[in-house]
Image: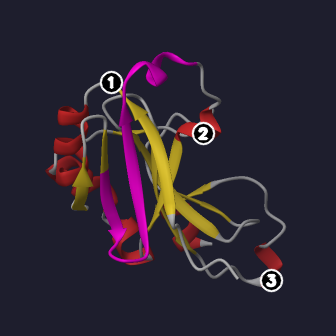
């Protein structure tokens, strides 16, 4: 039923700074007004709304401040270089200490994390074909580890 992300919303401190950041990620600007700006993730299908204002001060659960962007596995393999080229630092996920993209065999996906200027959690994520005998693995494997399994 669900084919992808339709829309997501994030609170931001500075709309101008966030517009610059999301433009640098390669998202196409859709529209803005005084307090909000929207960017196409997939034009005509999904977008992200950025909301500037006091709402940013309201406590948010991390799940409400996270977006995953779908990418190909090949793109994920070069994601650290791409993020570095646009001056964005990857960050470790959860208790991991490495910023290297990793695979979740039990979920059939792989990802790398980074933050926007307001600390909203962003993720580049792709589907991964997992052999049946590995689908019960719950530990996360770096891409390097995954490719030798």
Task: Please tell me which residue is depicted at 24% across the width and 36% down the height of the picture.
Answer: 34
In terms of image quadrants, where is residue 63? top right
Gap in angstroms between the C-alphas marked 3 and 2: 32 Å
**Secondary structure at numbered mark 3:** helix
In the image, residue 119 above or below residue 134? above
Task: Please tell me which residue is depicted at 84% across the width and 67% down the height of the picture.
Answer: 136
Residue 35 appears in view: yes
N-terminal of the pair, mark 3 or mark 1, is 1
Q: Which mark is residue 64?
A: 2
Q: How many marks?
A: 3
Label 3 crowding class (10 Å Cα cut-off): few <14, some 14-19, many 20+?
A: few
Q: Which mark is residue 13?
A: 1
Label 2 crowding class (10 Å Cα cut-off): few <14, some 14-19, many 20+?
A: few
In terms of image quadrants, where is residue 81? bottom left
Is 99 on the left or on the right of 147, as rendered?
left
In the image, residue 141 above or below residue 73? above
User: Which range is magenta?
Assistant: 38-58
Residue 125 horizontal/vertical position (percent): 50, 63
Gap in angstroms between the C-alphas marked 1 and 2: 16 Å
Residue 8 horizontal/vertical position (percent): 50, 53
- Is 65 covered by the magenta stretch? no
Residue nearer the viewer, 55 or 116: 55
Name the residue beneath numbered marker 3: 132
Gap in angstroms between the C-alphas marked 3 and 1: 45 Å
């Amino acid at each position: 039923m669900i084919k992808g992300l339709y829309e997501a919303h994030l609170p931001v401190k500075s709309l101008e700074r966030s517009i610059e950041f999301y433009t640098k990620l390669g998202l196409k600007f859709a529209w803005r007004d005084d307090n909000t700006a929207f960017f196409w993730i997939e034009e005509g299908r999904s977008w992200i709304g950025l909301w500037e204002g006091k709402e940013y001060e309201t406590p948010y659960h991390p799940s409400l401040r996270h977006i995953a962007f779908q990418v190909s596995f090949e793109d994920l393999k070069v994601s650290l270089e791409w993020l570095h080229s646009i001056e964005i630092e990857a960050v470790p996920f959860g208790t991991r200490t490495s910023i290297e993209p990793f695979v979740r065999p039990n979920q059939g996906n792989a990802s790398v994390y980074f933050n926007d200027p307001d600390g909203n959690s962003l993720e580049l994520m792709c589907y991964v074909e997992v052999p049946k005998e590995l689908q019960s693995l719950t530990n996360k494997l770096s891409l390097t580890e995954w490719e030798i399994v």
